[in-house]
Image: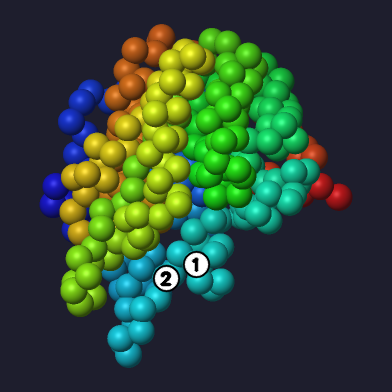
Amino acid sequence: VPGPPPDGWRWEPARAQADVAGRWLLFIGDSRGRIAYAAAVARDAGETPPGWPMHRVAAGDECEPHGWDADGNERWGYYSAGCMSRWKGGCLDDHRGKNVRKVCALDYVSKTRYTFVWHSLNTKLHMRSMLSRVHKLVSEASAPPDAVFLSTGLWDMQMASAHLVCPRMHLVLQALRAELPRTQIALLGFAPCPECPPDHDRSCYHWGRRRSKLTDLMAGGEACGLNATRAADASYLDVGKITGSLPNMRSSPCGTVHLFGAGSEGVISQWYASLAGLPQATTQPVRLPNATELRQFWSPGTYRMQAAP
């Protein structure tokens, strides 16, 4: 619906939203998960805190996800080296799956605790690395998170054999369920972005081919994700409901299955609606330990980076 800047749109939730005050919300996954995480933090703070990942920028900003410069040259701010720190904050990825040791985590603490743990491929090595981080976070807090937002599968679709994608999705959900038996877990679904007409003449800001190897695998990934979440007593977030109704918005495009701006806010609204049945929150003490790997922390009056020696 029409709303305030930066791009004149906001996402109006259609269903009741859970009150997440006093909760610990743990995001695990890839760049789609990090964008959703940024949307959740910005929703809490009112805007993106300085130094933290963004989910949207103002129209015309040099880092807008996709657009054209004054000379008419197409550009993608999301992939620009100069904009990388703005989109990713203090946390970069794991160098295309090669680094499983010092992968960054984000911890934002207000009335709600929002934690992001990067996770890419669902190999046994990568899952063991991710699960060890989750186990450590739970041990530090002396309590499990209230809910987990999991965004995974796309790296496997792009870098692994097609026949491994579905078994790995089942494997990671079962592993998380074993680690967090009482935590609500939601898997971010798969849906292609709206397709721009071929003659749009710079008037459409979505990008990514409608039909490709990735979109073909996503169709199977959706069916697999539904089955895998049922088997793990988890929920499936159908992002097709969002991408299918997403208007063409300059600062809120959909690009190669990434939802920016209002789209990512819609994802968070959909997730919060699914959390409406959570038991009453009991605020857990948040412990910010000495980091054994790169961690970015924020809490009232505190902002610091900690890194392993």
Judge by depth and name the residue closer to the eye, 191 or 245: 191
* Left or right of residue 209: residue 196: left
- Amino acid under disc 2: Trp
- Amino acid under disc 1: Tyr
Label 1 sits on a secondary structure element that is: helix
Report x, y in % for residue 211: 35, 54
Kindly identify the residue that appears in the image at 51 percent across and 71 percent down: 80
* Left or right of residue 157: residue 103: right
> Residue farthest to the right?
309
| Residue linked to disc 1 | 79
Tell me if label 2 and label 1 are in contact, CB under 8 Å.
Answer: yes
> Residue farthest to the bottom?
71
Report x, y in % for residue 3: 17, 52
Report x, y in % for residue 81: 56, 71
Label 2 sits on a secondary structure element that is: loop
Query: How far is mark 2 from mark 1, CA to CA?
Result: 6 Å
